[in-house]
Image (cartoon, rainbow, N blue to C red):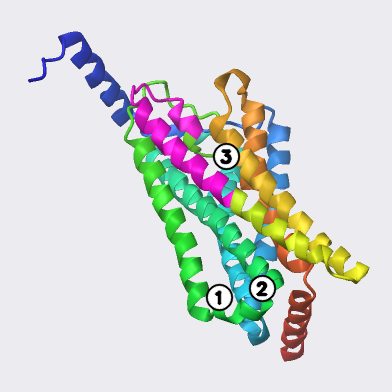
Amino acid sequence: MSLPLPPSVLHTQRQQMSNSCSISEFLLLAFANIRELQLLHFWLFLGIYLAALLANGLVITTVACDHRLHTPMYFFLLNLALLDLGAISTTVPKAMANSLWDTRAISHPRCAAQVFLFTFLISAELCLLTVMAYDRYVAICKPLHYGTLLGTRACVHMAAAAWGCGFLHAVLHTANTFSLPLCQGNAVDQCFCEVPQILKLSCSDAYLREVAVLVVSVCLAFGCFVFIVLSYGQIFRAVLRIPCKQGRHKAFSTCLPYLAVVSLFVSTGMIACLKPPSISSPSLDLLVAVLYSVVPPAVNPLIYSMRNHEIKGALRKLMTGCFQKQ
């Protein structure tokens, strides 16, 4: 039989829950306090956002409209472009609006929605990048089994598994984060609602629960990254056996930028979650967040698609057809 809690402890718990429930909005980190710099940040992020929208939109339209691109590799590229569009649209427009209107406020429901959507999309993207590495491994190392291992049904199942894994991961993080009592104010030291920054506002002693969620995230990121590296290790071994020097150069020029973006994406995401408070600062946190939330969606179309001759040929054909109709 458990002993009753002392009145002081009960009062403290009630006060913490009251503080958590009374938070109707959060205050995001401002890019700058000088109006000219705020407008500069707005125009800079507007340019990046429009470039990402255009590039990913072109990839989606081209792959969807050209039947010659209805293959596993381009099916996964289409899914990646959708995830990139969603991820950058979840965070950047709100940050731009705050800079333009010189405000920092975001409502509690919108903050929770931002946490859920962003975690969902970047987790699904990491899983999809792992699937894409497997696709390239089979295509290069086991070309005779490509049609069997990556049939239409298998591709749909793998893409659905990536999206489903991201959804479950987001539900876990969002439920854990917003079920904790918040009593350290409502100022989030980030330009969007990020789980590590919101956890800093918590006054809960639920360390085991927080650690358990963190372990799940690290295992997911580390496991996907190790699988990607091992897959491309096998690909590089196969590429080195190609007698043609030009063929080897083409393969390496395609694979190395992909690995660079994946490494940047995973490493900065893990730094955001694991860095100790002693080295944390608003400017460093902002830089890390931009590197894993803004840069990959803007760069992925260039790395995966615009360097691809088939995509460029299909895009040229699509644009020519549009001009002829006019």
Magenta residue check for 223 = yes
Which residue is drawn at the image coordinates 37% and 26% (left, top)? 207
Query: Horizontal placement of 129 versus 319: left or right?
Result: left
Residue 70 appears in which quarter of the rendering?
bottom right
Judged by depth in the image, the label closer to the viewer, 3 or 1, is 1
Q: Which mark is residue 141?
A: none
Which residue is drawn at the image coordinates 69% and 45% (left, top)? 264
Q: Which mark is residue 149?
A: 1
Which one is earlier in the sequence, the residue at label 3 or at label 1?
3
**Is there a contact, CB below 8 Å, between mark 1 and mark 2?**
yes
Q: Amino acid at mark 2?
A: Lys
Viewer-proximal residue among 32 and 169: 169
- Residue 136's place in the image compared with 25, above or below, is below
The residue labelled by disc 3 is: 98
Q: Secondary structure at mark 2?
A: loop
Q: How far apart in space, not on screen, are marks 3 and 2 (Cα)?
A: 50 Å
Which one is earlier in the sequence, the residue at label 1 or at label 2?
2
The span picked out in magenta is: 196-225
Residue positioned most to the left: 1
- Residue 7's place in the image compared with 127, above or below, is above
Residue 127 coordinates in the image, percent (x, y)? 54, 56
Residue 183 coordinates in the image, percent (x, y)? 36, 21
